[in-house]
Amino acid sequence: MRSARERLKQQREQDRTREKRRRVLVVSAAVVGVLGLAAVVGVIAAAGGGKESSDKAGPVVPPAGALGGDKPAIPQGRPDAPSTLAVWEDFRCPACAQFESVMRASVHQLVASGALKAEYHLATLIDANLGGSGSLRAANAAACAQDAGKFTAYHDVLYTNQPPETNDAYAKNAKLIELAAKVPGLDTPAFRSCVEEGAHDAWVKKSQEAFKKSDFNGTPTVMLNGQSIFPQKGGEQISPENLKKWVAEANKGKKPGTASPAAGSPGR
């Protein structure tokens, strides 16, 4: 009897160890009106994580117009917009694609109206958890699109064409260049060279380091004016309607931004 209890205890300990090593999926039921999202899935970084890419990167070269400091980001929208949406994302992350598919139109509308500016922080969490380099390669390509003033359009193309999480298709520069053809005017020699040379690899890795130091739980991490809103804000689940309501509340008595929008922003 004692031996059976010991075996059971050992099995439970082994199960707990395996649980710490795997990715955890956190599913949050969310009501999103006519778009009908039944669940939003957040990918949580496993304890200890996986091994980061050890490829040496050159000097840190920010994409055009990027925000510096300890949390590098690609800004979109009018710089004087009264509210800021910060999105920490990974182009291999299926939860990020789910978030984008539901919230994209509302975010674009708010950004174009000057009510909101967006700051995209690029992470490589899936590369660390599953291995491969698709997160890094796609993030570099997105930064190259920012150089061309076409970040938003290419960002959306990457998510609408996202391969299965375990398929590291974005590790191939040829695939990323192929997708650039879906954005008018992006597939140029300059863009191809930027992608092939990994011009912004070191900058992306700096952004990933910022993600790790920020102690976030996973991607996507979405914050409105510094307050977490994904998967919920207080007791309210995120949805297109709630995002518009939260921004309206935050902007009460404030004028929309009127400065020239950042390159590649919706409506530019």
Image (cartoon, rainbow, N blue to C red):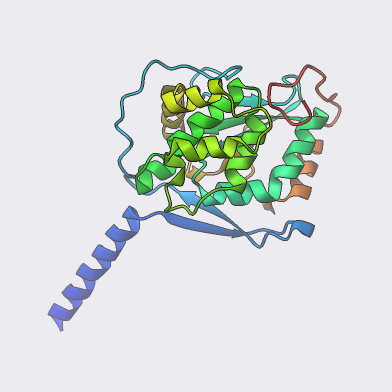
Q: Quadrant of the N terminus?
A: bottom left
Q: Quadrant of the C terminus?
A: top right
**For residue 60, which quarter of the picture?**
top left
**Looking at the image, which residue is at 72% across and 51% down?**
239
Q: Is 37 left or right of 109, judged from the image as shown?
A: left
* Residue 26 percent coordinates (x, y): 51, 57
The answer to whether residue 227 is visible is no
* Residue 169 percent coordinates (x, y): 45, 46
The answer to whether residue 202 is visible is yes
**Looking at the image, which residue is at 81% across and 37% down?**
248
* Residue 258 percent coordinates (x, y): 82, 19
Residue 84 higher or lower than 65, as above or below: below
Give whichever of 180, 39 is nearer the camera: 180
**For residue 259, which quarter of the picture?**
top right
**Looking at the image, which residue is at 19% across and 77% down?**
5
Residue 80 higher or lower than 36, as above or below: above
